[in-house]
Amino acid sequence: MSDKAKILLVDDEPGMLRYIKTLLEVEEHHVSTASTGEEALEIVQKGMNPDLVLLDLLMPGIDGLETLENLRKIRPGVKVVMLSCVNDTKKVVQAIRLGAADYITKPFQKAELDNVIDQCLGTNQQNYAGEVEELGDETFFVAASANMRKLRSQAALVANVDIPVLMLGESGTGKEVMARLIHKLSPRAHRTFLKVNCAAVPADLLESELFGYEAGAFTGATHAKPGKFELCNKGTILLDEIGEMPPSLQAKLLHVLQDQQFSRLGSRSVLKVDVRILAATNINIPEALANKRLREDLYYRLNAFTLHIPPLRERKEEIPILLKHFMTQLSEQYARSPLPFTPELLQACLNYPWPGNLRELGNFVKRYLVLGDEKLAIHELQPRSDGSGAQFDPTPQRANGGAPENPGGLKGLARSAKDEAEAEAIAKALDETNWNRKQAAALLQISYKALLYKIRQYGIAQSKTHRLSAGAS
């Protein structure tokens, strides 16, 4: 427990005010009290700079939300914990949006209050700047940047409020990781977490995947099958790439959000489920709404709370931590000794914009681990942009396997450098696998067919030594 913190306690119930004040003073905190929002604002305006404000959500006059908003204008950095009743879900969400650091539900025990205060005052707070939060299934969360620490704090708060959460962000930024974090921090943590990629399942199969079907519902349905919502009852479901869901199916999903019930395909009976829905997308929401690609009523249902996941280029403080963790994770997975990141390679990683975000960074570490060539790794991270922010097509267009078309200018130079780095990486992978092309394709994370095409494209030939070695084996 932090020693002798200055705490401003605001509550309009005299009995609750005395009770909480006694609990705080037992821990030797300096406690000031106010019974209205107006009185609390006056105390702060007169010079009090509290370490923490405990603020009742429902009060006559200026309520807790308006008091919170004004407090943060006067003292932008002040930590505010809302004191709320169980049924104030919407107001709690509003408080989180306005910057509340935490909330606690009345009635509460002393241990619960102590824990919240410890977290807010930093006594018991995990240091995410140097640590990785494991979430299971080889996923992990890092919050070394200010915006990710804020997101982590919001995720922790909204995890306990059983509402839909919409996660927005570029592809590969970690929206699924955020969903897993919310699930882990929620009361449903011991229940099932399922992810459905709406873009990966054909539109005509997505409905049966989500809601199940009865025998005879369609040709080939020889037996009944439960859908993901049934399998995930009492748990959490992540609908990834929600913007790719057909509008007709969005209407059925809206019904589940509103009433927590649905029917299997081919069934007239109604099934009731208790599932928390999280959704993620990288689409342009205003454009999708305008084009009727995303139903407006569904969007507002999903948008009870929104988390915007920033791209990796906006949280570069995390790159060294991510590189190290990916290297540790992958070296164990492939039974290889981890490779170091020299200052030159680390600087190249920090300078690179990572358009593919965490997914691209993870694949980069995998290639570096497999190929073990630092110069090639640095070369791979050379700028690929013409300065406008637009990325070049990563697949070079060659005529008859020769030099790249239109070789002049920066674009041509970038493609030429990319060709050279790609050809070198393929040759090294083939050399390491003794020209076992299926193994090489797996190491490079491309399909076997794509590897054969690129071998022909770059004119990579198997040496006589490799042919003899392969024949002997």
Image: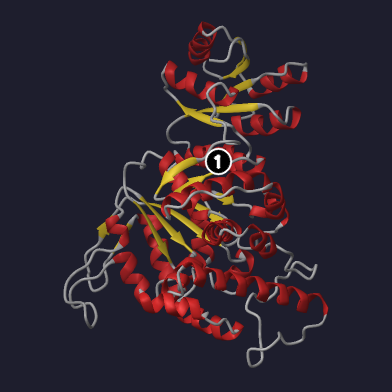
| Residue 199 visible in the current orientation | no
Q: Is residue 53 left or right of residue 236?
A: right
Question: Residue 7, position in %: x, y?
Answer: 62, 16
Question: Residue 233, position in %: x, y?
Answer: 29, 52
| Residue 128 visible in the current orientation | yes
Q: Give the residue number, with chain letter if any, for mark 1.
A: 152
Q: How is the image coloured?
A: secondary structure
Tell which of 291 and 338 is nearer to you: 338
**Quadrant into which the C terminus falls:** bottom left
Quadrant of residue 3 in the image?
top right
Tell me the residue at 72%/68% (across/down).
384
Quadrant of residue 213 in the image?
bottom left
Question: Residue 110, position in %: x, y?
Answer: 44, 16
Tell which of 302 and 225 is nearer to you: 225
Circle 1 packing at 10 Å, graded few (<14), some (14-19), many (20+), is: many
267 over 188 or under it: above or below: below
